[in-house]
Amino acid sequence: MKPTLYSLLRPFWPGGETLQSLKKELAQTQWLSAEALEAWQFERIRRLVAYAYENVPYYNELYCSLDIHPEDIKSIGDFQKLPFVTREEINTHLREMTAWKTHGKLLADSTGGSTGEPLHFYREKAFDWWDPALELRGRGWYGVGEGEKMALVWGAKRDMHLQTWRERFKAILLQERVLNAFNMTDATMAEFAGMLVKWKPAMFRAYASALALFAQYVKDHQINGIRPRIIETTAEKVTQPQRELIEEVFQCKVADWYSARELGTIAYQCPEGSLHVCETRYLEVVANDRPVKAGELGEVAITSLHQYGMPFIRYKIGDMAIADDGPCTCGRGLPRLKEVVGRLQDFLVTSEGQFVHGGYFPHTLRHWPQILRYQVYQPDRKHLEVRLMCKTSDDLAWISNLRNELRECFGVQMNISLNIVDEIPLTSAGKHRPIISEVKPDFV
């Protein structure tokens, strides 16, 4: 792999040696057997819990109130008896969640809050080396190296190095080009496509919904020559229709990058299609606060094994997922997720009380190609509002057929409104939220 200017300079930056060391460590641990990896993780779990007990006021008070001591944790089963931590508890007890030894060395941060109230948290500088190491390893599975050309279809300004001259210089070193997800007009997409044909990026990093719009534009205008080696999608779930369109247009695989602002990289999809959970995250899938079997749907709880300044121990991140078991054909021993199904807010409920995941809609609406974008809002178990952006409003005879199909799924007692709109606003981070539900599944 030909070195880039960025990869040549990075080892000489402050902390650059740390990144190189972590990359070497991760290159080895990914090949551990499942049994060896479990032992590797458990040792770090015990170390983290002991540190939190001794140094973090919130965990010390919580565990003492429950008569729990780190020495009691002698197995994963013992660890799974520890209480969960939620976003609401973190926001309420933010200062008590940080280790007193690291006060003054932590950086304040927050999530975008696209699904509700933002999460406020702290991270230490080491996070800025661990997370890039995990990202770079995943991209390396597809032959993309550090500092190779990257095209972004993105909306979060803090991730785009365009604000100051230092950031713009970094973007030049990183070889990044950006299409703003807030400004995807025919003119901006035409300009971006023309640039990419000549520039030839090694990869895309994108919101799936925004990249799907760009891919459709490229397809409709028969633009050829944009051939990255990998499409990295994150921040929102990529639907199967979106995946098929993107892979058809750009002739490369889509890799899910499961990440979160507060935790960084959680899992990365390998070329064989498995979504591998990073070894630095101990991930559980739970329902009714108990771990479920592989293949069963549940809520995601994550313990980050290297964040000590503000530990995340059995943290309910707000996602729903299905775990997978057995080895991957790629040979890596990393745990696998069958699917990250979506956020809790992605679940809808029928008039009879049965839950329906938001993935029902892309599979259903693909039969009506005149729909450009949609958003579904469910305030309660009796009402469903569907907002539709369409290519044309001249012939809307198909609306009645769509209404009938939705009634078959959600029940005749459901009050369904279908509204044709000119625009569906994006979140403050430039993401599209196709599902907004105020109703939680019963098993959460």
Image (cartoon, grey):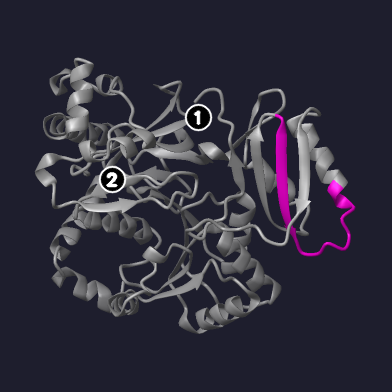
Query: Badges 2 and 1: C-beta atoms under 8 Å apart?
Result: no
Give the camera-side residue of 36 and 246. 246
Answer with the quarter of the image where residue 81 lies: top left
**SS for callout 1:** loop
Identified by mark 1, the residue type is Gly
Tell which residue pokes out farthest to the top in this image. 67
Residue 374, numbered label: none
Toward the viewer: 319 or 329?
Answer: 319
| Residue 295 image label | 1
On screen, residue 177 versus residue 280, left or right, reads right
Label 2: element kind: loop
Q: Amino acid at mark 2?
A: Trp
Residue sitting at x 26%, y 52%: 108
Residue at mark 2 to residue at mark 1: CA–CA distance: 24 Å
249 left or right, relative to 81: right
Mark with earlier residue (2, 1): 2
Picture quarter containing residue 248?
Answer: bottom right
* Front label number (2 vs 1): 1
Nearer-the-camera pick, 277 or 318: 318
Residue 133 at x, y = what percent? 26, 57
Residue 196 appears in the rendering: yes
Range covered by the magenta-colored residues: 382-399
Q: Is residue 371 magenta?
A: no
Q: Which of the numbered marks, if any, corresponds to residue 31?
A: 2
